[in-house]
Amino acid sequence: MRGSVARLARMLLLGSLVCLVVSPVAAEVTKEDIQRAGAYFGLGINVGSAFELDSEADNPNPGTDVDVDPSFGNHIYAGYSFGSLDGLIPGVELGQWAPSIGGQMRFDYLGNFDLVENPGTEFARQRIWVLTWDAKLMAPSFANAQPYALVGVGIMSADTRGDTTDDRDRGATIRVGGGIDVYLTKHIALALGISYLHPVESNIEDFKHVAGDIGLAFHF
């Protein structure tokens, strides 16, 4: 578990350093460019953290501990930003401090999680697909960067295959996350994010996980 958290932390640290390096040399982008209304889409790579199975149903030796090693995957999303909230409330002017809102659909895939029974015997592998519809709140931009937070609902599908099991489960899930977009040009941004996926149905409750991601976003 500690190893997976360390890998996730290293990925996020690397992404943060890249953001710091590219932001000063990026093309000049105004606040109006960043907070404008319009469609966008993005894609990139993920790394999911380890989590422990709570259910003995997937464990060939009940009573022993089972860890799930981290894995890489990818994601793609598309959405629409409705622009700044300034002036939405009559008589309240937020100016440059006004946040923006948007909505998006996002698909994530994480493959080949190794299920390892302590002290280190692999007995199965898992793959996870997630599709969510997210509401997105984007903070006022600074320099060429815009932080954001999001919350969404959707569907998770988990596939577990090994010597003693061959199962596929699916159910509803909640996504909570955040990140930062660093604009390289008016239309292209380096995107760094993190999400927590929490299944709400008992048949997939063991598949909750944290995933960090880095990629590119394209704003029309």
Image (tube, rainbow, N blue to C red):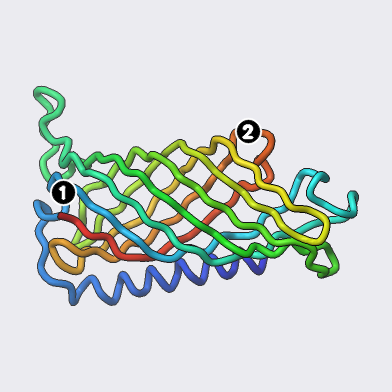
**Seen in the image, is 71 located left or right of residue 63?**
left
**How far apart in space, not on screen, are marks 2 and 1 (Cα)?**
37 Å
Across and down, in percent, residue 203 comes to 68, 37
Residue, x 86% and y 54% (percent of image)? 60
The kind of secondary structure element at disc 1 is loop
Three-letter residue code for mark 1: Gln
**Seen in the image, is 70 located left or right of residue 72?**
right
Front position in the image: 113 or 33: 113
Quadrant in the picture for residue 44? bottom left
Three-letter residue code for mark 2: Glu
Across and down, in percent, residue 66 comes to 79, 57
Residue, x 78% and y 67% (percent of image)? 122
Q: Earlier in the sequence, mark 2 or mark 1?
A: 1
Asked if marks 2 and 1 touch (Cβ < 8 Å), the reply is no
Residue, x 55% and y 53% (percent of image)? 210
Q: Quadrant of the C terminus?
A: bottom left
Mark 2 sits on what residue?
A: 201
Across and down, in percent, residue 80 comes to 23, 44
Image vertical order of residue 44 relative to residue 206, above or below: below
Q: Quadrant of the N terminus?
A: bottom right
**Seen in the image, is 173 located left or right of residue 78?**
right
**Seen in the image, is 147 located left or right of residue 51?**
left
Nearer the observer: mark 2 or 1; the answer is 2
The kind of secondary structure element at disc 2 is loop
Residue, x 25% and y 55% (percent of image)? 146
Front position in the image: 50 or 138: 50
Front position in the image: 155 or 69: 155
Mark 1 sits on what residue?
A: 35
Across and down, in percent, residue 18 comes to 34, 74
